[in-house]
Amino acid sequence: MKEKVLAKAREAKEASHFIGKASTDLKNKIILRMADYITSKKDELIEANKIDVANAEKKGLSKALIDRLTLTEKRIYEMVKGLEEVVALPDPVGEITKMWLRPNGMQVGRMRVPIGVIGVIYEARPNVTVDVTGLCLKAGNSVVLRGGSEAINSNVSLVKILKDALKDEGMHEGVVTYIDIPQREAVLEMIKLEGIIDLIIPRGGEGLIRTVTENSRIPVLKHYKGVCHVFVDREADLKMAEEICFNAKVQRPATCNAMETMLVDETVAKKFLPKMLKRFEESRVELRGCKKTKAIYPNIKDVTEEDYYREYLDLILNVKVVKDMDEAIEHITKYGSAHSDAIVTKNYDKAMKFLREVDSSAVFVNASTRLNDGYQFGLGAEIGISTDKIHARGPMGLEELTCTKFIVFGSGQLRQ
């Protein structure tokens, strides 16, 4: 096993030198050929996926996981559309982001370059195989993929298609390598390969991300969980607040940028909460409230200290009445996960204070936390959302899959 993982990583390392210097036109041609091949092979992909789905059902895996695992014609079309969108994005590689002149006449600048080899470890969703490949390739990187065992037939079929596209465009096939070893030990071997793999990106549940982070010898970009908040200020437009809070919780509750706790200023709580909480209940949201919330809306569960730390990924919501914005910020600082947090207010000074003091990857004023997304931010597709503070933070698009190097233009300058 160790030798096989090492061989695949070395293949990716070798390929990185070819894709790293490829022209934008060639990279785009490869990605479009991948899109064409996926379209033409969709029936084969669906058949391979049916095997994975059947195995998942036999094992009694959750309906939510089986839903993420399932490939339909619509989802295959979305993968293809995603590749086409990556082609339309500007190529960051080679961009000179800044230049400045030194007193000795030397010009110093920064240029964007590929990171090199990116290892991506993910769970049930086979669409990640395609999304990640398109982004890494456009940014000039090769990629080592390790998908979950539950999607192995789907992923093997997809990787074969992606490799065929690379081969037919004359590119090293190691640009995309896939570790098809289902045992967990394969991941532990992969994350030891410092000097070969340059960056690890785990995509999945908190357990996976913690395991990778605690054992990796390679830098890891991560977010453990999304404990997101919306604070309804006393100077909020309450109709707007209702729509934002509802969207943040109900539109797609199983995402990392969905609201888990709603904070409401006590000045407007009696006016805002009855209608808001009734609307949540009508949409089958399980409510858990603090004492002040229950005094206004009694027939809901008590919220516990542990609940405030939880990422439910479900139609469950904590509700807390706070004295003011300062208490709301204190709550977010203590219980939040630095992912996505929002304030609803008409007060500019409060909005700016919230933006400055809430230390999250994305902070919103009068908008839903569900908008923390690369596509919504105009970055195109994304490889994930990072809550780290080094290298990349927030949605990771093409620029975040590059790093910079210094470039220097001289005319014979020497150090004195």
Image: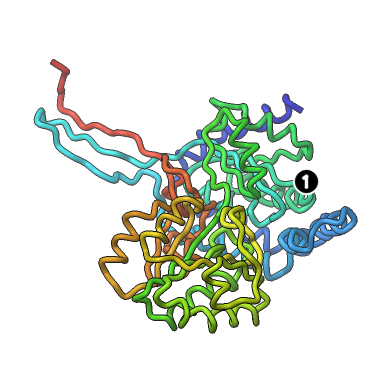
Colour option used: rainbow
- Residue at 31% x, 66% y: name it: 351
**Would residue 76 be found to the left or right of residue 107 on screen?**
right
**Would residue 416 be found to the left or right of residue 299 on screen?**
left
Image location (x, y in percent) of residue 277: 57, 78
**Secondary structure under the numbered disc 1 in the rendered image:** helix
Is residue 228 among the parts visible in the rendering?
yes
Observer-nearest residue: 39 or 3?
3
Q: Is residue 303 above or below residue 236?
A: above
Residue found farthest to the left:
103
Q: Pointer 1: residues within 10 angstroms few (<14), some, or many (20+)?
A: some
- Residue at 54% x, 25% y: name it: 195
In the rendered structure, which amino acid carries the disc numbered 1?
Ser
Image location (x, y in percent) of residue 40: 71, 63
The N terminus lies in which quarter of the figure?
A: top right
Judging by the rendered image, the residue that carries numbered circle 1 is: 149
Observer-nearest residue: 391 or 1?
391
Image location (x, y in percent) of residue 158: 71, 52
Image location (x, y in percent) of residue 223: 54, 47
Observer-nearest residue: 228 or 101?
228
The C terminus lies in which quarter of the figure?
A: top left
Q: Is residue 249 above or below residue 97?
A: below
Observer-nearest residue: 219 or 223?
223
Q: Can you tell which quarter of the image residue 326 is in? A: bottom left
Q: Can you tell which quarter of the image residue 194 is in? A: top right
**Would residue 16 be found to the left or right of residue 69 on screen?**
left
Is residue 25 among the parts visible in the rendering?
no
**Would residue 215 be found to the left or right of residue 65 on screen?**
left
